[in-house]
Amino acid sequence: MPPEYAELVSEGVAAINETYRTGDIAHWRRHVEKVCDPEVVLEGVGETFTEGKWRGHDGVVEFVANQMDVLDSMFSRLDEFTEASDDTFVAVVTFGGRARSSGLDVQMRPTHVYRMRGGKIWLWQIFQSRQQALDSVATQPDESPPV
């Protein structure tokens, strides 16, 4: 796996934190357009903090915008990066903020699986636990869909 994939995740955390800090989603959009395939699918799998599928650059940007609608004082931190194969990597990320509706502090530690094609993310899955993510990597073929 190219070493720049680890940098890609670090840059993503920096871009999202800048977006959270400034409230300007343009920081996140530029990063998404740089690192994601135009047909990317972001999927919240199982009982994650948010379930569903978001498609394309606009969908990935909307995913973060939706989080910003419900949380204040948001933050994100990369805790772990693991290469699963040449084109798949796993990242454990802590993120959180303060719920706008209740004022309660929220912190989660989901695990992200990124599958690459041509140096870009084509599938981004978010799991509640590291083990669920690793099980998914072990059972799903490491192939991208037809172009």
Image (spheres, helix red, strand yellow):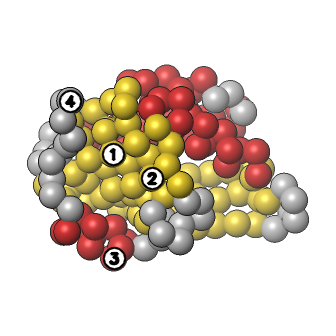
Residue 43: which disc? 2
Res 137 visible: yes
Residue 133 in the image, given as x and y percentages of width and height: 33, 67
User: Quick check: 59 left or right of 35?
Assistant: right
User: Callout 1: helix, strand or loop?
Assistant: strand
First reached walking from the N terminus: tag 4 or tag 2: 2
- Whole-angstrom CA distance, mark 3 to mark 4, is 30 Å
First reached walking from the N terminus: tag 3 or tag 4: 3
- Whole-angstrom CA distance, mark 1 to mark 2, is 8 Å
Binning the other alpha carbons within 10 Å of mark 1 as few (below 14), some (14 to 19) or many (20 upward) gives many
The amino acid on which the numbered mark 2 sits, given as a three-letter code, is Glu
The amino acid on which the numbered mark 3 sits, given as a three-letter code, is Gln
Q: Quadrant of residue 85?
A: bottom left
User: Quick check: 116 left or right of 80?
Assistant: left
User: Quick check: 13 left or right of 39?
Assistant: right
- Residue matched to label 4: 147
- Residue matched to label 1: 123
Q: Quadrant of residue 1?
A: top left
User: Callout 4: helix, strand or loop?
Assistant: loop
- Whole-angstrom CA distance, mark 4 to mark 2, is 19 Å
- Residue matched to label 3: 131
**Marks 4 and 2 close (CB-CB < 8 Å):** no
Res 14 visible: no
First reached walking from the N terminus: tag 3 or tag 1: 1
